[in-house]
Amino acid sequence: MTTDRPSHPALLVLADGLVLRGDAFGAQGTAVGEVVFNTGMTGYQEVMTDPSYAGQLVTFTYPELGNTGVNGADQEADAPHVRGVIARQLVPQHSSWRAEDSLEAWLQRHNVVGISGLDTRALVRHLREGGAINGAISSDGSTPQQLLERVRSAPSMAGLNLAEQVTTAAPYQWEALCAADFDQRRQPAPERPYRVVAIDFGIKRAILERLAAHGCAVTVLPASASLQQVLERNPEGVFLSNGPGDPSAVSGGITLAQGLLEQPDLPVFGICLGHQILGLALGGRTYKLGYGHRGLNHPCGSPGSVEITSQNHGFALDADSLPADSVEVTHVNLNDRTVAALAHRQRPVFGVQYHPEASPGPHDADHHFGRFVDLMAQRRR
C-alpha cells in the first residue's frame, strides 16, 4: 500500500535475542515491556487504553491498524496504557464518520512508540512457543546489543503490583443512567439505584457504563481502600475491577477481599484481576500463563452452555488450590481448561476471569452484571 508517511527504521528486540526490523510509527523513542499478543479483529483503541495492558508491548494479530482512526467515545481511560504497539501494517488514511484523529497522531500525542512492517504471524508463533517475554521497541538509534541489555535487566511481570500505578488517585462517582436511557433489554430500571462500591485496580469505563446500565450508582475507590472505607459507604454490593500485573502482589486488595468475605450477606463481584484477587482471598493460588489470554474470541463454558468472551490476562487461578467445600468453579476456558469463573457456595460472591462488558465485544457474558444486580435485589428485599 502506498503512503505519504516518511519511513523511519525501528527495532523490536526480545530478551531471547530475537531482533526484528520494521518501520517506526507513533512517538519516537524506546519502550521496554512484556511482549504479548491480542487476537481481536477490532477494538484497537479500547485495547490500547485498557489499564490492564500497563507495562506491555501489544502485538495485534489482525494485520491492519488505524483504519477507523480514534475517537474519545471508545477510550477505556483518559490515555493509552500500553507501552508500545506492534503491527503488520499501519493504514495511511483512516476512514470512519466517528474518527476524531488518526491513530498515529494520537499515539504521538500520548508518547506511545510503535513498530510496523513486521511478520506478526511469525512473531505470534514465536511467543506461543516460547511464552510472553520482555522486549523493546526502539526508533531512537539504539543498537540491538544496547536494547538487549536494557531488556534483560527489566523486571519480569511476575511479582509486579501495577494496580497501584494505574488506580484512581481519589474517589469519584459514576452515576446510574436516567430511566429513559436505561437498558430495557436487560431488566427494568430499579426505583432506586443500587449503591455499588467499585475498587479500581485498573477499571475500564465500559464496566462502569454497564453497571450504570443495570441500575447501579457507583462510587469508585482507589486500590488502597480499606475495609472501613468501603463499608462506611454503606454499599449494597462491592465490585473488584480488572487491572494489570501479578494478582498475588496486590496484597492490599487481597486483604480487603478477605474482609469483604466476612460480611455474610454482602454481594461481591470480581472481573479479571478482581476475580483472581477473590480466588486468592478464598485460599487459592495463581500462576503465570505461558502467553496469556488476550482477544475477543475465547470460548468459556459451564455445563450446557458456552460463552464467547473477551479476555486480557496473563495469570490464572490454580483450580486445585481452591477449597472445594466453599468454592465452585462454575466456568472453564474451553481452550485450556483454566478457571474462567468461580462462585462461593454459601455467600453471594462470584468472579469471572473474562470481561462481560466486552468493549468492543462480544456481549455473550453481559448477563453477569444482571446476576450481580439480582443478588443486590435479593439482599434489599
Image: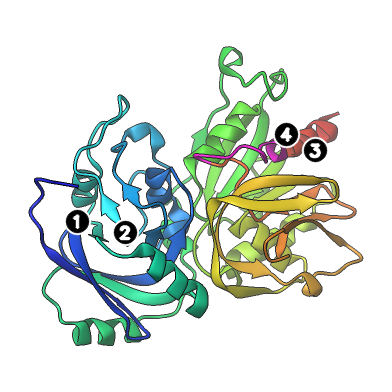
Residue designated by label 3: 375
Residue 3 in the image, given as x and y percentages of width and height: 13, 46
**Other residues around mark 4 within 10 Å, as few (<14) / some (14–19) / many (≥20):** some
3D distance between C-alphas at marks 4 and 1: 42 Å
Q: Which residue shows up at 65% across the image and 29% down it?
A: 214
Residue designated by label 4: 370
Q: Which residue shows up at 33% across the image and 34% down it?
A: 72
Residue 134 in the image, given as x and y percentages of width and height: 38, 77
Earlier sequence position, callout 3 versus callout 1: 1
3D distance between C-alphas at marks 3 and 1: 48 Å
Mark whose residue sits in front, 4 or 3: 4
3D distance between C-alphas at marks 1 and 2: 9 Å
Mark whose residue sits in front, 4 or 1: 1
Mark whose residue sits in front, 3 or 1: 1
Callout 3 amino acid: Leu
* Residue nearest the observer in this picture, 37 or 212: 37
In the picture shown, does residue 23 fall above or below 158? Answer: above
Quadrant where the C terminus sits is: top right
Residue designated by label 2: 85
Earlier sequence position, callout 3 versus callout 2: 2
Give the residues drawn in magenta, as a range: 359-369
3D distance between C-alphas at marks 4 and 2: 35 Å
Residue designated by label 1: 25
Residue 368 in the image, given as x and y percentages of width and height: 71, 40
* Residue nearest the observer in this picture, 219 or 132: 132
